[in-house]
Image (cartoon, helix red, strand yellow):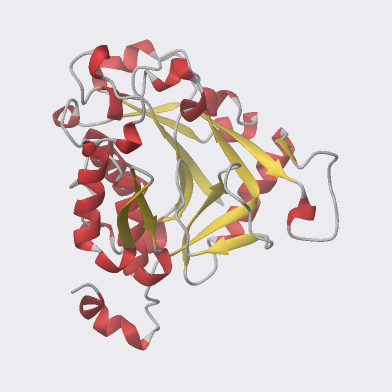
């Protein structure tokens, strides 16, 4: 059973999209992770966890907060979700000959979200799977129910039994942005595999809503004024500086290049993943030289 749902949130005391769209049964498992100075502003009927005061305002606050959550969760199954996610479902004819809805995809019902949690719970009981989640609706889906050894972001279920054995040795707080990419590489390099669902998808509202984009603290507070805010944060030096740090740690896992005047990157997840049962495990560091 997935025991807890952590939702780290900042400056969104009255806008909790993920929480509002969960079925009541799952809302009982929610722990909103907040800054101490904002706790009194939240009135949602759920549990709360305040981050240490020393993390507030630090350059890598989000990465440090995620580490804090992982250690707090310990050896349970749990979810860490952005606060702006709506869960959806793809038509099963994407990977099979059977259709289960009229559209190609739609928002998930409460019962379907519970079904998704049951599926993720089962996947996390597989020997090598420790990180699972829904996929982006915009990426071309594979013709399979799921794909292993992929990047899983924004709404992620973890097997704390696996992760707690490795978390103290992971370097996941050295970058402010793209910290989720670094985390996946750290997991894969330690034999913790990932699984990305084809059926279950997520709508990250901060990526599509102009109003919410302006409240993405991890990005917006890197700049002193609104006038300095870039049109595309993912094309900035700050983003690519973080990616270069990750590339230096896992050179086999990422390629950075220019195409049509824009910076691009390709992530090679499978090149980083080394099962603990593999003969390659002992030569892992040779792979990253």
Task: Determine whether 164 is above or below 28 in the image.
Answer: below
Residue at 36% from the left image edge and 11% from the top image edge: 41
- In this view, the residue in front, 241 or 200, is 241
Q: Residue furthest bottom?
A: 279
Residue at 17% from the left image edge and 47% from the top image edge: 174
Residue at 31% from the left image edge and 42% from the top image edge: 66
- In this view, the residue in front, 243 or 169, is 243
Task: Determine whether 65 is above or below 14 in the image.
Answer: below
Does the image show residue 157? Answer: yes
Picture quadrant of residue 146: bottom right
Horizontal relation, residue 126 to residue 264: left or right:
right
Horizontal relation, residue 28 to residue 257: left or right:
right
- In this view, the residue in front, 135 or 233, is 233
Picture quadrant of residue 120: bottom right
Task: Determine whether 176 is above or below 231 in the image.
Answer: below
In x, y percent, where is residue 59? 16, 33
In x, y percent, where is residue 186? 30, 60
In x, y percent, where is residue 37? 24, 16
- In this view, the residue in front, 284 or 208, is 208
Residue at 69% from the left image edge and 61% from the top image edge: 143
Count of marks placed on residues: 0
In x, y percent, where is residue 283? 25, 83
Picture quadrant of residue 235: top left
Does the image show residue 169? Answer: no
Horizontal relation, residue 240 to residue 76: left or right:
left
Indicate the quadrant containing the C terminus: top left, top right, bottom left or bottom right.
Answer: bottom left
Task: Determine whether 147 is above or below 200 in the image.
Answer: below
């Amino acid at each position: 059973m997935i025991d807890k749902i952590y939702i780290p949130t900042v400056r969104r005391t009255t806008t909790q999209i993920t929480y509002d769209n969960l079925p009541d049964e799952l809302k009982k498992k929610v722990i909103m992770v907040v800054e101490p100075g904002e706790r009194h502003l939240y009135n949602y009927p759920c549990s709360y966890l305040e981050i240490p005061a020393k993390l507030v305002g630090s350059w890598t606050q989000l990465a440090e907060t995620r580490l804090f959550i992982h250690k707090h969760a310990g050896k349970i199954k749990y979810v860490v979700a952005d606060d702006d996610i709506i869960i959806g479902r793809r038509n099963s004819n994407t990977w099979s000959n059977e259709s289960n809805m009229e559209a190609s995809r739609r928002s998930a019902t409460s019962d379907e979200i519970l079904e998704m949690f049951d599926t993720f719970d089962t996947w996390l009981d597989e020997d090598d799977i420790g990180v699972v989640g829904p996929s982006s609706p915009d990426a071309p889906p594979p013709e399979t129910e799921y794909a292993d050894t992929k990047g899983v972001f924004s709404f992620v279920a973890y097997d704390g039994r696996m992760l707690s054995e490795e978390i103290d040795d992971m370097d996941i707080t050295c970058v402010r942005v793209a910290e989720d990419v670094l985390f996946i590489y750290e997991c894969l390099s330690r034999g913790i595999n990932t699984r990305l669902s084809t059926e279950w998808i997520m709508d990250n509202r901060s990526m599509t809503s102009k109003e919410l984009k302006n409240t993405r603290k991890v990005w917006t507070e890197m700049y002193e004024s609104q006038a300095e805010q870039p049109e595309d944060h993912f094309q900035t030096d700050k983003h690519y500086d973080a990616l270069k740090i990750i590339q230096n740690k896992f050179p086999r896992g990422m390629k950075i290049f220019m195409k049509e005047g824009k910076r691009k990157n390709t992530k090679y997840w499978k090149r980083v993943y080394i099962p603990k049962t593999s003969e390659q495990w002992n030569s892992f560091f040779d792979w990253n030289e």
